[in-house]
Amino acid sequence: MDEKTKADALVLLMNEFHLQSEASVLKDWIIEGRLPDIYQERTVQLFQNQIRKQLVKPW
């Protein structure tokens, strides 16, 4: 993911799961890929959608 897509994904995750710590989500979920099992399926769907948007963005 590019930096803009990571930032968008972070906002989506924070809103979707009502999370409090942006730093923790960015480090653990987005960078290191350590997702809580309960959120894994939905998080993967959100990431896939963000990457699709990134790929079809006009440059």
Image (cartoon, helix red, strand yellow):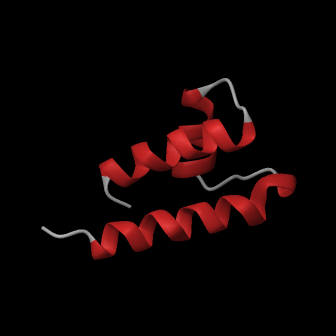
Find the residue positioned furthest to the left. Answer: 59
- Residue 52 is left or right of residue 21, and the answer is left
Residue lying at 62% horizontally and 56% vertically, measured from the top left: 33
- Left or right placement of residue 50 versus residue 40 in this view: left
Residue ranking furthest to the top:
20
Return the x and y of residue 31 as percentages of the image width and height.
51, 50
Q: Name the side, left or right, on which 7 lies relative to 44.
A: left
The vertical placement of 23 against 17, above or below, is: above
Q: Quadrant of the C terminus?
A: bottom left
Q: Is residue 13 left or right of residue 55?
A: right
Q: Quadrant of residue 57?
A: bottom left
Q: Nearer the viewer, residue 25 or 45?
A: 45
Please name whichever residue, 52 or 23, is drawn nearer the observer in this view of the structure: 52
> Residue 32 at what x, y percent from top left?
58, 51
Examine the rendered structure and indicate whether residue 1 appears above or below residue 48. Answer: above
**Residue shown at 67% from the left, 24% from the top:** 20
List x then y, in percent, for residue 23. 55, 28
Q: Whole-percent x and y of residue 44?
A: 65, 66
Counting every numbered tag in the picture gives 0
Residue, x 43% and y 68% (percent of image)? Answer: 51
Q: Quadrant of the N terminus?
A: bottom left
